[in-house]
Amino acid sequence: MAMKPTDLQKYNAMKLVNQMKKGDAPGRPGRAERPLDRREQRRLDQAAGLVPFAVKLNGELVQQIQALASERKAGINEIVAELLGKALKK
């Protein structure tokens, strides 16, 4: 079912209002840059050759990975990729 043009305009207006309510003014001193939205992040990940890969892990293993990530000041994705790469080389 296609949206009517007026419904699309209402939707876009509501989306814009919500973005304005949530976000700070970009470039404002003392404010962090706003994070990328999901679509932008997905495009950047795809351009970098990253593929989402969901797994279920034991809670203790996840805690070890998180501890290693905080120790190295790196992201969990990088740590898991590094550990998998080392394990697969063996």
Image: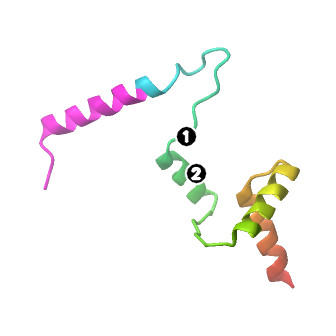
Find residue 80 and name its label.
none
The picture quadrant where one finds residue 59 is: bottom right
Query: What is the x, y in percent for residue 58?
Result: 69, 72
Query: What is the x, y in percent for residue 71?
Result: 87, 51
Q: How is the image coloured?
A: rainbow
Find residue 36 and name its label.
1
Q: Residue at x 80, y 51 (%)?
A: 74
Disc 2 element: helix
Residue highlighted by disc 2? 44
Q: Residue at x 55, y 22 (%)?
A: 26
Q: Amino acid at mark 1?
A: Leu
Query: What is the x, y in percent for residue 79?
Result: 78, 61
Tag 1 and tag 2, C-beta contact below 8 Å: yes
Question: Which is closer to the viewer, label 1 or label 2?
Answer: 1
State the extent of the magenta-drawn residues as a range. Answer: 1-19
Q: Amino acid at mark 2?
A: Leu
Q: How many marks?
A: 2
Q: Is residue 5 left or right of residue 37?
A: left
**Quadrant including the C terminus:** bottom right
